[in-house]
Image (cartoon, grey):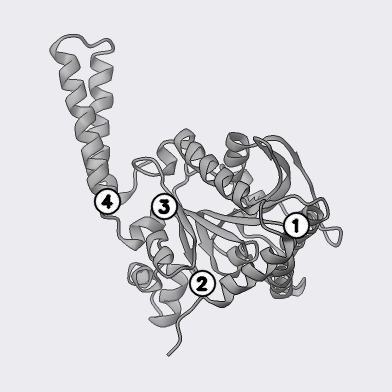
Amino acid sequence: MSLDFEKDVADIEAKIEEFKAKNPEPTGSLVKDLNRLELERVEKLKETYANLTPWQTVQVARHPERPLIRDFINGLFSEFIELHGDRLFGDDHGMIGGFATLENHRIMVIGHQKGRDLDEKIKCNFGQACPEGYRKALRLMKLAEKFHLPIVTFIDTPGAFPGRDAEERGQAEAIARNLLEMFALKTPVIALVTGEGGSGGAIGIGVGDIVLMLSNAVYSVISPEGCASILWRDGSKAGEAANALKITAKSLLQLKIIDEIIPEPLGGAHRNHAATMKATRKTLLKHLNSLAKISPKKLTSRRFEKFAAMGRFK
């Protein structure tokens, strides 16, 4: 699937597919012609992705083929044991987690799950967790703290579910409780924004000692469409809102909201899952090793100071 702004790339890829269909085993000058088309594709991808607007970045972050948390679990970790339920209401499929192993690190993995096909998306509520999802996440975090295991969270949600039933079960309280408790966790926490990081639904599992973002992910207090509908009563101005929100990884690194950007392969993570996993694994291991050397008391004080320092005041 190609995005609107990738039309030139899609045209070249169509030519490559047509060429391969006509010449399944190219030789001689045909090989040179194919290489020329491949080089043209790479150059066009570089040109396109070097100049993405914030709104185009949002579209990449939402790409249906972008890796989801189960892709990261399968690509990064071994011995994953999924845990279910919040012990209060039920099991939210929009938030998953469990024990896992990353090389020599035994950790707790928690994150939003959007779902890949329509049935799974409906089951997972399109990655919009309910209160029981955030309470399950907190239960797993406290379990990790009990066993002195570091926590890695994967953020990919348009926002927490805003429906009436979620509000009746205490959506705002569940997210607020997570924020409070995460600041006090006496174990390392790494938060990684892999796609969309939307509103309180994202920050509900985003209080980390280290906050990372994939280079084409977005992270914001509200979706561009939501912002546009509030400010201008016009959702079609989402692109203008995206520019104003400073929603991209580059902007958020400059503002010191995040700590590091994990580079995606050329053309976005959706084009090469394996390369995305390789870069993510390297970055996670680096920070897991460094955080392991810090005492629990120092971790909590640094975490609080980190978030308290965010923002600019006049």
Q: Position of residue 225 (x, y in %)?
A: 43, 69
Residue plotted at (25% across, 40% down)? 9
Q: Where is residue 210 in the image (x, y as percent from the top left)?
A: 57, 59
Give the spatial CA distance, label 4 vs label 3.
Answer: 11 Å
Percent coordinates x, y for residue 129 in the rendering: 66, 60
Residue farthest bottom in this picture: 314
What residue type is disc 3 on? Ser
Q: In which image quadrant can residue 169 be found?
A: bottom right
The circle drawn on residue 222 is none
SS state under label 2:
loop
> Marks 4 and 2, Cα distance to the nearest angstrom?
25 Å
Q: Locate the C terminus and report the quarter of the image it occupies.
A: bottom left
Q: Residue furthest left?
A: 29
Secondary structure under badge 3?
loop
Q: What residue would you read off at disc 3? A: 215
Q: Look at mark 4 in the image and give the residue it sits on.
A: 50
Marks 1 and 4, how far apart at CA: 38 Å
Q: Which mark is residue 221?
A: 2
